[in-house]
Amino acid sequence: MKKIVVAGRNDSGKSTILGEMYKGLKMKDYQPIAVGSGVQDEKPYLLKGIESTYLTIAIPEPGHDIVTDIDRVIRNAVNLIKERNSLIQHARRALEELNKVRSVLDLGHLYQKDIPPVSTLPDVVLVEAVGINDGYKSEETRRLGDILVTIVPADIKNEIIMEQGNILLDEADIIVVTKTDETAREVATTTIKLLQRIYRYKAIIPVVATQGVHMDLVLDEIIRRLADPVRLLEQDKEKVKA
Ligand SMILES: Nc1nc2c(ncn2[C@@H]2O[C@H](COP(=O)(O)OP(=O)(O)OP(=O)(O)O)[C@@H](O)[C@H]2O)c(=O)[nH]1
Ligand SMILES: [Mg+2]
């Protein structure tokens, strides 16, 4: 499963973007699983429409490798979904058996509407990296993900962007500039132009995360990077046949 990591300074809008990505990916027939970086993430995620089945929290213990820890947390969460699915299927079969017996005894069918449907297994992971105060230098966060989405608030100080060793900006696949609605136009423009000058070939997308403005552009970039060439090839064949 590919991991999309959302990184950025504290309060930059990571959780908001993650919630929007969850919804957007679901609309495109992906089933994301979201990994928060602490219990404080749980409630806001639920409020943003992330279903509890697909929500988990990784709290890295000191001294533990955050990358292997996240993998363990994801494995556990997927196993829980599988176990639950297997119980649901079990309940379904048991009810069928019972109904066979009841039918022989002329007792009429029992319907159990409260047996839930089985859950789709997740196929992509969304991780919010712990908020960082000291700019964009976390090497470990870079190692976490296959697709790195770095969040920059529009009113960020230019010096921070220009610092050396900003690995989370240097290696970002997508740079999302947030809070463009509450930042003065000249300030937001300066931030974007500076980013464009340093990162000439990167996708840099200004958004109003809280209102979903331009989130479609962010999603397009993500889906392009998620696309599995083999799957595309199969789809091509289908299309040519049709
Ligand atoms: N006006 C405006 N507010 C935003 C935008 N994006 C996020 N916010 C607000 O900024 C605050 C922080 O957003 P979060 O998504 O929690 O940011 P975060 O980076 O996850 O924060 P931490 O996890 O605490 O580091 C919230 O009150 C959001 O509603 C935006 O584009 N415009
Ligand atoms: Mg957050």
Image (cartoon, rainbow, N blue to C red):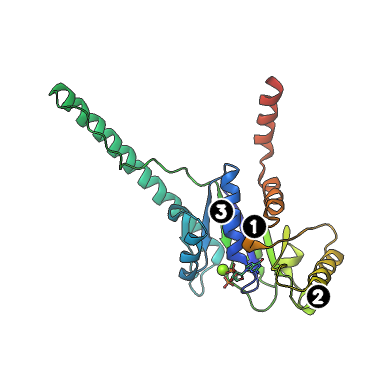
- Rendered-image quarter of ligand 2: bottom right
Asked if the residue at tag 2 contacts the one at tag 3, i.e. Cβ–Cβ closer than 8 Å, the answer is no
Give the residue drawn at x 28%, y 39%: 91
Residue type at the position of mark 2: Met
The mark nearer the N terminus, 1 or 2, is: 2
Q: Residues within 10 Å of mark 1 (few under 14, many from 20)?
A: some
Q: Is residue 200 left or right of residue 91?
A: right
Height in image: 229 above or below 191?
Answer: above
Q: Secondary structure at mark 1?
A: loop
The mark nearer the N terminus, 3 or 1, is: 3
Asked where in the image residue 82 lies, by quadrant, the reply is top left
Residue 232 x %, y %: 68, 35
Height in image: 170 above or below 24?
Answer: below
Residue at the spot of label 1 = 212
Residue at the spot of label 3 = 125
Give the residue drawn at x 71%, y 55%: 214
Q: CA distance from mark 1 to mark 2?
A: 28 Å
Label of residue 162 in the image = 2
Residue 209 x %, y %: 65, 62
Q: In front here: 165 or 184?
A: 184
Label of residue 2 in the image = none
Q: Residues within 10 Å of mark 2 (few under 14, many from 20)?
A: few
Q: Nearer the viewer, mark 1 or mark 2?
A: 1
Residue type at the position of mark 1: Gly
